[in-house]
Amino acid sequence: MTTATSPMARAVGVTVLLTGLGSLLGFVRDLLLGRFFGADAGTDAFLVAWTIPETAAPLLIEGAMAFVLVPLFSRAMEAGQDLRGLVSATLPYLCLALLALTALTAAGAPWLVGLLAPGIRRADLAADCMRVASVTILTFGLAGYLSAALRAHQAFAPPAAIYAAYNVGIVTCVWALRDQGPYAAAVGVAAGGAGMVLVQAPAFARRCWPPRRPARGVPLPMSVFLPVAVFTLARQSQVFVERFVGSKLAEGSISHLNYAQKIAQVPMVLSLIVATVSFPQLARALAAGDTARARRRIADDLVTASAIVLIAGAALLVCAPDVVALLLQYGAFTAADTAATAWIMRVYALGLLGQAVVGVVCRVYFCGARASWYPVLAMGAGLAATVVLARPSWGVTGIAAANAAGITLAAALLLAGLRRRAVALPVRTALVPLGGLLAAAAAAAGAGWGTRTLLAGLPPPIALASTGAAIAVVFCPVAFYAVAALSGATATLTDTTKITHLIRMRGRS
């Protein structure tokens, strides 16, 4: 067992380390944005332009590109094929498509700004920033392609380093060009996208270069890409709704929503590391028809991801003001900005479990030779709930609550659909561990509130560390025993049901 699990453990460890570095640099990035530019009409304009890379990243890096190409490459390797021929057959066409889309986005930047944020105060600045940021469509697409090929080769370090390279580019440009205002951040986004490609290029060249003559009949599978792309865009459209509604609210509302979301999503990103590393294994298991191994993989990933986001969610609910103040309250970012951002972040935290479940479960639907349209319907229902609930009259709190409600609904629908998939994972098998983890999170949040109240007079860093420790000390044992107890009860009930069914069948015979 040690031999089989050690490569997985090493891959997870490297990915955690490099992803943590990327998240740390992301905090530095947000700190500099808040310190130099605060939360005003200028930062709102940049964040509207940032919608382009925020959409390109899930679509072209961790979303559609990965869901299509990782299974494609994994199936090819399972069949003993050389990936260099597959790369030659797909990469040139992808580059042409990305270049065309980049040019169209840059040319249509003013129209896109008017569509995304009709009430934005600095539409001119938003359009200028969007023109610069549009280059990320090309660079993110290339980065996603290289990541998929490397992960199929079980090489996880270069793909895990892309967000560190991305944030280095932004931080460097914001610091060096801060006199240019938020436009400096747009330049940094473009530079960071180029860094994503460069950090992976040497490893990709070693494994997939020089190219070989393309094999016939292996074009980029658009029939698979289309449902994955629509699903990813529907999921990202929650951000579009936020920017659209937020542009009609007070100045700085989009910025507060963005800062809160960026902090709240860090545990969600970390929770999906195991699922990201195990995705090629899941694709190979399904390609080989080993449904039992695939079922175990999904169940384990669900428990791991849910445990991470729930303990982090409990901490964010209790410590949101302290976390925001520690990370962002410097320079132009005021105490009022901290209070507004912290309140939004607490609401966002309620949707973290849904985010993690969607991120894990959707992979099952996209592993086959033909992708399913069911996730599009599930995500469409979640998006519809977000649109209905995100009303300007309910302010930024309503927007955040709509986001949490929409993603939770999508997660529930995706879980319900698993029993009809190739892995045939029963809903009860998924829900029982989640119930135990939710109970542990509730207990941990209660312990955290009590600890924070008792330590209110201490310096914020000490109080924050102590409260976080109390939450962890309560969550871990409660989660272990709750999940074990509920799983045991479910197993007993399942065994009883099977025995009863066998008795009935024998009686009929």
Image: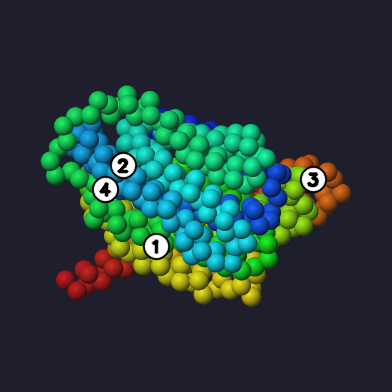
Secondary structure of the residue carrying tag 1 is helix
At label 2, the amino acid type is Cys
Q: How is the image coloured?
A: rainbow
Q: How far apart are marks 4 and 2 (CA)?
A: 30 Å
> Measured along the vertical axis of the image, is residue 153 above or below residue 256?
above
Residue at 42% in and 62% down: 234
For image coordinates 71% across by 60% down, the residue present is 340
Lateral position of residue 295 relative to residue 459, left or right: left
Q: Residue furthest left?
A: 216
How far is the residue under mark 4 from the one under mark 3?
Answer: 49 Å
Please identify the quarter of the rendering in which residue 216 is found: top left
**Which percent across, then down, holds residue 412?**
44, 65
Circle number at residue 414: 1
Please tell me which of labels 1 and 3 falls first in the chain. Answer: 1
Residue wearing tag 4: 286
Looking at the image, can residue 314 be seen? no
Q: Which residue type does callout 1 highlight?
A: Leu
Secondary structure, mark 2, is helix
Mark closer to the chain start, 1 or 4:
4
Query: Is residue 185 placed above or below 377 in the rendered structure?
Result: above
Q: Is residue 165 left or right of residue 229?
A: right
Q: Position of residue 427 (x, y in %)?
A: 39, 63
* Mark 1 to mark 2 CA distance (whole Å): 32 Å
Label 4: element kind: helix
Residue highlighted by disc 2: 95
Q: Evaluate whether residue 92 shows in this view.
A: yes
